[in-house]
């Protein structure tokens, strides 16, 4: 009799446990939505805004086009059929004070035409689409801005987005669009200071780009701290570049168009 009670008690407990599990496994029955993924693919850092800088200056000069992949995530249940939505190019909101330094990107000039209709595939919770960005001479003096916005559909609505508040207290939903800002920014390496100034002179972005292009230096390697430890090689680069600059006709000027580009005093002989 005691054994029978144990069996019955175990059966009742198992039934209650299974009942609880069934409640926990209730699936979401509401609407579905889409939003731009907000994790930086290279850094794995969370994007704090809708702006996505694209630094051509950190990519080797001979590379004239690059593919940018953007991910769109699903909110809600996956389905056993495809669901379509669109990504549209919209007018870029450029602040009045920056219109002389920034311009809206032009299709066929700053980026290749792309398929704006996208699909969340069956049984998937996200999708990606690619845009081919183009490098132009204009980026030497001004940034180009490409703004992409998701389009809501009956099946895929706007159910989620983080928000930011501007100085005028206007709210903007930042995960429903991406603002791609292209420029030729090449930051000053951490190692360019002290004795390096005696080799290369004062830093300028144009000088750094010129050195990398002429010497065929990979720009990601150029920016690494290890590269700055190669003092003997850097001295060779500085002296070679000074001889190269001396031979240029017309001469190479700095960004102001008036200052002659030169290396530092240790590279003058």
Image (cartoon, rainbow, N blue to C red):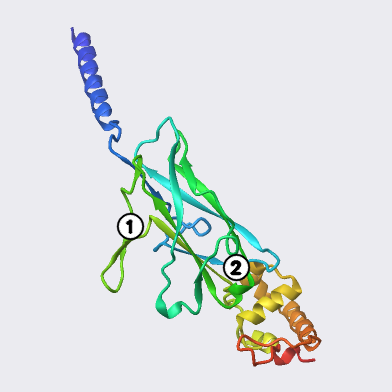
Viewer-nearest residue: 9 or 36: 36
Mark 1 or 2 closer to N-term?
2
Q: Residue 56: which disc?
A: 2
181 relative position to 50: left or right: right
Q: Residue at x 25, y 20 (%)?
A: 14
Quarter of the image where the C terminus is located: bottom right
Q: CA distance from mark 1 to mark 2?
A: 28 Å
Res. 230 visible in picture = no
Crowding at label 1, few (<14), some or many (≥20) Cα neighbours within 10 Å? some
Crowding at label 2, few (<14), some or many (≥20) Cα neighbours within 10 Å? many
Q: Residue at x 64, y 73 (%)?
A: 137
Viewer-nearest residue: 87 or 5: 87
Q: Residue 162: which disc?
A: 1
Res. 110 visible in picture = yes
Q: Secondary structure at mark 2?
A: helix
Quarter of the image where the N terminus is located: top left
Q: Secondary structure at mark 1?
A: loop
Viewer-nearest residue: 58 or 236: 58
**Residue 212 horizontal/vertical position (percent):** 70, 74
């Amino acid at each position: 009799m005691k054994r029978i009670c144990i069996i019955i008690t175990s059966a009742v407990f198992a039934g209650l446990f299974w009942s609880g599990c069934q409640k926990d496994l209730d699936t979401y029955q509401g609407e579905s939505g889409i939003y731009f993924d907000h994790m930086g693919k290279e850094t794995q850092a969370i994007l704090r805004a809708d702006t996505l800088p694209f630094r051509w200056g950190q990519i080797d000069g001979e590379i004239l086009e690059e593919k940018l992949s953007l991910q769109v995530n699903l909110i809600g249940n996956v389905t056993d059929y495809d669901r379509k939505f669109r990504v549209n190019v919209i007018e870029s909101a450029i602040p009045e004070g920056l219109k002389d330094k920034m311009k809206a990107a032009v299709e066929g000039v700053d980026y290749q035409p792309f398929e704006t209709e996208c699909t969340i595939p069956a049984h998937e919770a996200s999708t990606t689409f690619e845009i081919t960005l183009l490098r132009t001479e204009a980026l030497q003096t001004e940034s180009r801005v490409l703004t992409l916005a998701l389009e809501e559909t009956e099946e895929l609505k706007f159910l989620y987005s983080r928000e930011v508040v501007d100085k005028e207290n206007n709210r903007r939903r930042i995960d429903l669009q991406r603002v791609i800002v292209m420029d030729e920014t090449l930051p000053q390496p951490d190692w360019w200071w002290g004795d390096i100034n005696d080799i290369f002179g004062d830093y300028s972005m144009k000088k750094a780009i010129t050195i990398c292009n002429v010497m065929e230096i990979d720009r990601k390697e150029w920016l690494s701290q290890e590269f700055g430890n190669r003092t003997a090689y850097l001295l060779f680069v500085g002296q070679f570049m000074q001889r190269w600059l001396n031979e240029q006709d017309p001469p190479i000027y700095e960004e102001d168009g008036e200052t002659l580009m030169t290396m530092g005093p240790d590279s003058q002989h």
